[in-house]
Image (cartoon, grey):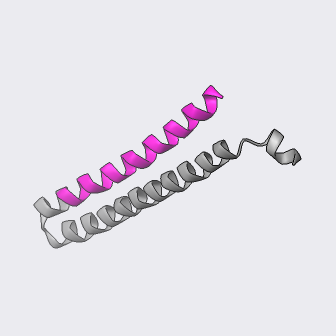
Amino acid sequence: MLAAKVVEWGKIGQLIYSALGVALAVAIAFSVAVAGGTRFAELRRDGAAARATLWAVLAILGLMVCAAAIVLGIVVMAKK
């Protein structure tokens, strides 16, 4: 089989496994950021400043995770 000589199936499997894991993590982090931003806006409008602050921190953390994933992806691509 010609493909077995050219393709490293173990590396492709590792790539797929890693990509699925990172995609899921980034999707969850962005969802947390959106939820945090939405709750922050609602609670701030209602006058609940302390709870709004907690949601804002959660939104910022979610965005930081997304930004870190982008930077890590660029660094990994630049090394190859």
Residue at the far front in the pictured view: 1
Start-end of magenta stretch: 54-80
Image position of 8 (left or right of 76): right
Answer whether residue 53 is magenta in the image.
Answer: no
Q: Give coordinates of residue 6: x percent, y percent.
A: 82, 40
Above or below, 79 against 69 in this view is above
Q: Give coordinates of residue 11: x percent, y percent.
A: 65, 42
Q: Nearer the viewer, residue 13 or 65?
A: 13
- The overriding secondary structure of the stretch rendered in magenta is helix
Above or below, 55 against 9 in this view is below
* Residue at image coords 19%, 62%: 52
Q: Nearer the viewer, residue 72 or 16?
A: 16
Q: Give coordinates of residue 63: x percent, y percent.
A: 38, 50
* Residue at image coords 57%, 36%: 74
Image position of 33 (left or right of 77): left
Q: Give coordinates of residue 67: x percent, y percent.
A: 45, 44
Above or below, 8 against 43 in this view is above
Q: Nearer the viewer, residue 5 or 69?
A: 5
Q: How many labels does the image show?
A: 0
Residue at the far right in the pictured view: 2
Residue at the far top in the pictured view: 79
Q: In which quarter of the image is the C terminus?
A: top right
* Residue at image coords 30%, 62%: 36
Q: Which of 41 and 79 is in front in this view?
A: 79
Image position of 61 (left or right of 9): left
* Residue at image coords 50%, 37%: 71
Q: Which corner quadrant of the image does residue 59 belong to?
A: bottom left
Q: Which corner quadrant of the image does residue 39 belong to?
A: bottom left
